[in-house]
Amino acid sequence: MSFSSLLRCKTLLSLPCRTASRSLSTQTDGEVRIAKVLKEKFPLATSLKVVDISGGCGAMYEIHIESDEFRGKRAVQQHQLVNQALKEEIKGMHGLRIFTDVPRK
């Protein structure tokens, strides 16, 4: 994403204090696309949440994913798996927050 695109969506100004202004039941195209990729790469995921935290312009996302594929892996390894799965999508992002977990038995 170019610097001018970030300015147009006011990402640089709004990241620290952004408030949700859209309905919780609607998803942006970017959220849907990222969730689809993650569902394909982590078929054992029991929980997945993708949120565009850039105000809707797709510059920054927060991902919460719980999957058995993470069992036995350190947090950094879990995050590397998510980064690898989203390799192409990350190229157009300003930032990404990743939260991973393993399902409780």
Image: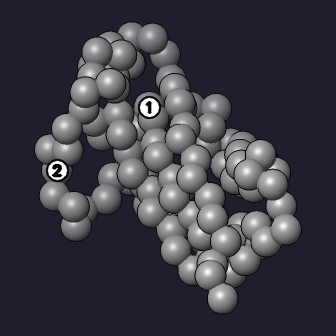
Q: Which residue is mark 2?
A: 22
Q: Secondary structure at mark 2?
A: loop
Residue found at the far front of this picture: 105
Q: Nearer the viewer, residue 53 or 8?
A: 53
Q: Residue at x 73, y 77 (%)?
A: 68
Q: Residue at x 62, y 82 (%)?
A: 104
Q: Is residue 8 visible?
A: no
Horizontal placement of 3 versus 54: left or right?
Answer: right
The image quadrant that residue 90 belongs to is: top right
From this view, report whether residue 96 is shown above or below residue 76. Answer: above
- How much space separates mark 1 and mark 2, taking CA atoms? 16 Å
Horizontal placement of 87 versus 24: left or right?
Answer: right
Callout 1–callout 2 Cβ contact below 8 Å: no
What is the quadrant of the C terminus in the image?
bottom right
Using a 10 Å C-alpha cutoff, classify the residue at mark 1 as few (fewer than 14 neighbours), some (14 to 19) or many (20 or more).
many
Q: Nearer the viewer, residue 15 or 101?
A: 101
Q: Which residue is mark 1?
A: 59
The type of residue carrying mark 2 is: Arg
Residue 81: x, y in percent? 77, 54
Residue 69: x, y in percent? 77, 72
Horizontal placement of 55 versus 83: left or right?
Answer: left
Which badge, 1 or 2, comes first in the chain's sequence?
A: 2
Residue 11: x, y in percent? 33, 22
Q: Which scheme is used to colour this image of the protein?
A: one colour
Residue found at the far right of this picture: 72
Q: Secondary structure at mark 1?
A: loop
Q: Residue at x 51, y 53 (%)?
A: 63
Using a 10 Å C-alpha cutoff, classify the residue at mark 2 as few (fewer than 14 neighbours), some (14 to 19) or many (20 or more).
few
Horizontal placement of 2 versus 77: left or right?
Answer: left
Q: How many marks?
A: 2
Residue 44: x, y in percent? 68, 81
The type of residue carrying mark 1 is: Ala
